Image (cartoon, rainbow, N blue to C red):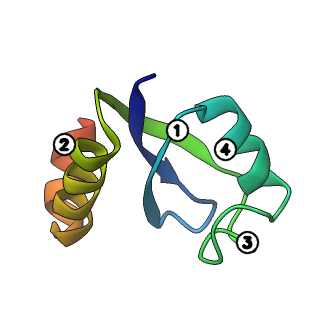
């Protein structure tokens, strides 16, 4: 089963990056406040970026790379700048 690296834009315009095997389920968890601690009070969310990876290790590496980017670089990645 493949993994998805995703970026959410939160209601406060912040960006959250995560990985999952089931994006629909994970978004449901985020919207119910059961996802990540960061997103608990920042909904509603909008998926602004997804990218597939074959293994969990690859997904974790890509997630770490994206999380280390400055906001401007993330905005370029998702195509808003």
Q: Give the mark, 2 or 4, whose residue is nearer the N terminus.
A: 4
Q: Which mark is residue 40?
A: 3
Q: Quadrant of residue 36?
A: bottom right
Dot 3: few (<14), some (14–19), or many (≥20) neighbours within 10 Å?
A: some
Please tell me which of labels 4 and 3 falls first in the chain. Answer: 4
Q: Real-space Cα distance between discs 1 and 2?
A: 13 Å
Element assignment for label 2:
helix
Q: Looking at this rendering, what residue extends furthest in the top direction?
A: 1
Q: Which disc is residue 65 wearing? A: none
**Residue of label 4:** 26
Determine crowd level at label 2: few under 14, some 14-19, many 20+ residues with C-alpha closer than 10 A: some
SS at mark 1 in the image: strand
Q: Position of residue 27 (x, y in %)?
A: 68, 43
In the picture of the structure, the residue carrying the numbered disc 2 is: 77
Q: Residue at x 64, y 49 (%)?
A: 45
Q: Secondary structure at mark 3?
A: loop
Looking at this view, is 24 or 72 the one in front? 24
Between discs 4 and 1, the one toward the N terminus: 4
Q: Secondary structure at mark 4?
A: helix
Asked if 24 appears above or below 70 in the picture, the reply is above
Mark 1 or mark 3: whose residue is earlier in sequence: 3
Q: Is residue 16 left or right of residue 38?
A: left
Question: In percent of the image, x 64 and y 60: which residue is there?
Answer: 11
- Residue 78 in the image: state x and y as whole percent: 27, 39
Query: Nearest the camera: 45 or 53?
Result: 53
Near-viewer residue (56 or 27): 56
Instruction: Give me the disc on residue 47.
Output: 1
> Spatial distance from mark 4 to mark 1, Cα to Cα?
11 Å
- Please identify the quarter of the rendering in which residue 22 is found: top right
């Amino acid at each position: 089963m493949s993994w998805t690296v995703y970026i959410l834009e939160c209601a406060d315009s912040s960006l959250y990056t995560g990985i999952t095997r089931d994006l629909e389920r994970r978004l449901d968890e985020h919207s119910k406040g059961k996802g990540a601690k960061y997103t608990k009070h920042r909904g509603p969310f909008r998926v602004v970026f997804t990218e597939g990876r074959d293994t969990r290790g690859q997904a974790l590496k890509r997630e770490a790379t994206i999380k280390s980017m400055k906001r401007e670089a993330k905005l370029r990645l998702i195509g808003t700048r």
